Amino acid sequence: MASVSKVSILDYFNIVFEGENGKIESNCKACGTRIQAKRSVTSNFVTHLKRKHQAMYDDFVKRKDMKREGYSSGSMHGFNTNGGNTRYTLPISTGGGAGGGVGGMGTLGGGVGGGTGGSTGGGVSKFDRHDPRQVLISEAIAKMIVRDLQPVSMVEYEGFRELLQLLEPRYTPESQHYIQGQLLPAYAYQAQLATRQALASAHALSLSLDLWRGLSGATTGYLGVTCHFLTSDWQMHSALLACLPLTGGSSGNRVLSDFDEVCHSHGVSGRAFRVVADPFLPAATLKPCCLPGFLVSPSFANGQVEDDEEEVDNGNNVEEGSRNGHGDGGEEGEWEDSWEQGLGVCRVDCFSRSLEQCVREGLHSCPQLSSTLAKAACFYNYITSAVPPEKLIQVFDGPGLIMGGPGIVPTVIRDWAAQLKVLRRLLDSVDFLEEVSGPGELALGGSERALLRELTDTLEPFTEAWDMVQGDRQADIQTDRHVSISLALPCVLGLRKHLSETSIPHCPSLLLGLSQALERRLAPILEDPLYITATTLDPQFKLTWSSNPDWHRQVLLEELTKHSNASSPLDPSTDLHSQAQTPPASTPSPQRPTTQAKSLEQELAVYLREEPTDEEALHYWQRKAIDFPLLAQVAKRAFTIPACDTVVKSIFTTAGRCLQAEKGRVLPKNLETLIYLKANYRLLWT
């Protein structure tokens, strides 16, 4: 074999054919397997040795290491300088720190050689910045920072750099300044280009506004603008258009002005069918609704208990939050007026947030729940630390139900629906758990069990509705999941029926509070023409939910006529707010041909005569667009309105926990870029 000064993977293969462009065919010397590849790309040969002949592969690696130690100059790879991929051609500035080569950039540890053949010593030749391996590792670091909302400064940490040196000695660590000032903005620019290109050909779209307020410092919050759009092939997608920092002087008019600017820059002004905005936006809070008193220790295994009382709403501050949401103060009143005047008839309340607020108000109406839930939480904390895991898993075998372990912060702490699932499992197996743990004074008494059982039974349909519209928001970052408002009306009908048939003697105030909150916040949906239209155009529902089909059919026909007349493409220069301030006509125009009215009425009659189907709504209308062209145009627009929270909303919540002063995980300086990239992660990297 070759000497140490010349190591090649081809030493372990016999070349039997060599063609043009460096193509070769070789037989493995150990097993005779024929492998085709190029001389410049030898990964097939390396993979074969690694999988089939470990000893030969170890020998190859050892010889390569010996060469590195003996020869510190020259390239040790056969890749092209830019990998042939224009994606990695980023705007890189030249110069930087002392000792940097051509295209180098300074770091805290001195200059980093960025030019060809640059080396920092130690006998190992460093990658060029444009080397494919260097680019891939830098991209992986950026993805980690974005996905976990880590501070960019971590790339300067001594331990992190030691890890990189161990994993790939040839990698040249990039500086915090380069990643924060060039690499992340370059990815953000790519996402903006891809988003604008997709929106230019979108057939229908709606927007969502998410506001995060209450931060301290120069930046007091962030505005997220998300677009939900339908493509020509009836595929639904969502993309975060912008994440803008808010300052202390940001008023409702200023936020609306920023919103207008985002719409204009992305070419969606005047094109949005509806704008989804929280009814509680002026006092937007990041505290999720939780069961009052049910504070579970996430790290009991190592004796450390994280204090999450500041992060979650455990029911004790509901009144204050709700009062602020209705704008009792001058600032909130100004916000509400600006919001109503600016968005007008285009605004739709977020259904999932209204549902959560109903649960919040219902829990707050029953103060005696808090002490019982606190005892249940103590019992749960005790059994999860005292009972062996193999027995616990017999009870808590669902995803996210077993909590605890060093450093684990489970979602159960922050979500009332997940907490309720844990509580139900606890009650279903309470005798077994008491038998194997012997909790003593922590054991739940008969009246306490009865009260908790009433709570879980009463809120179970609310949990099902929440899961239906919310799903797993972390997974949705990767799946582009969209739930339309067609589910909202059936959910409200089901919840109203459930509450009317429920009796809870131990906690009647809970039932009363839930019923009043539902009638105040969700019942208006039942008479809203937009929700009636969206639900009826969902082929799994049609008018099966209606107690008065004739009246709902007439409402539907009027709404369809209105939207059918307005279905022509809007002028992109039309301002969304000026359009919103002039409500569309609710009656057909006198100049409209009567044949069109008959056509629309006939389409609706034929559609409603068909049996409901479980086929997914967008698939159904893609298939039926030829049969019902007018109905399909309205369905295309109605189904762009989401019933669920946006991905950026969950990211705001996560970032809020990371920004706590005692944790200090994220640098606010570049937080908006990280949020933007995390929300558009799927657009960039899947």
Image (tube, rainbow, N blue to C red):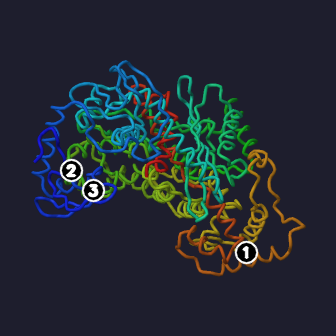
Question: Depth-wise, is mark 3 or mark 2 nearer the camera?
Answer: 2
Question: Which residue occupies the foreground of this view, 434 or 266?
Answer: 266
List x then y, in percent, for residue 630: 72, 71
Residue marked by disc 1:
550
Amino acid carrying label 1: it is Asp
Residue at 57% over, 62% down:
487
Q: Based on the displayed image, in which of its 4 quarters is residue 209 positioned?
A: top right
Residue at 21% over, 52% down:
46
Q: Can residue 371 be seen in this view?
A: no
- Dot 1: element: helix
Q: Is residue 339 left or right of residue 437?
A: right
Residue marked by disc 2:
389
* Relative height, residue 251 to residue 195 (above, below): above
Residue at 12% over, 56% down:
53
Question: Which residue occupies the foreground of this view, 513 or 154?
Answer: 154
Residue marked by disc 3:
395
Q: Which residue lies furthest to the top in this view?
A: 98
Q: Is residue 85 left or right of residue 484?
A: left
- Dot 3: element: loop
First in sequence: mark 3 vs mark 2: 2
Amino acid carrying label 2: it is Pro
Q: How many marks?
A: 3
List x then y, in percent, for residue 258: 67, 36
Q: How far is disc 2 from disc 1 in space, using C-alphas?
A: 58 Å
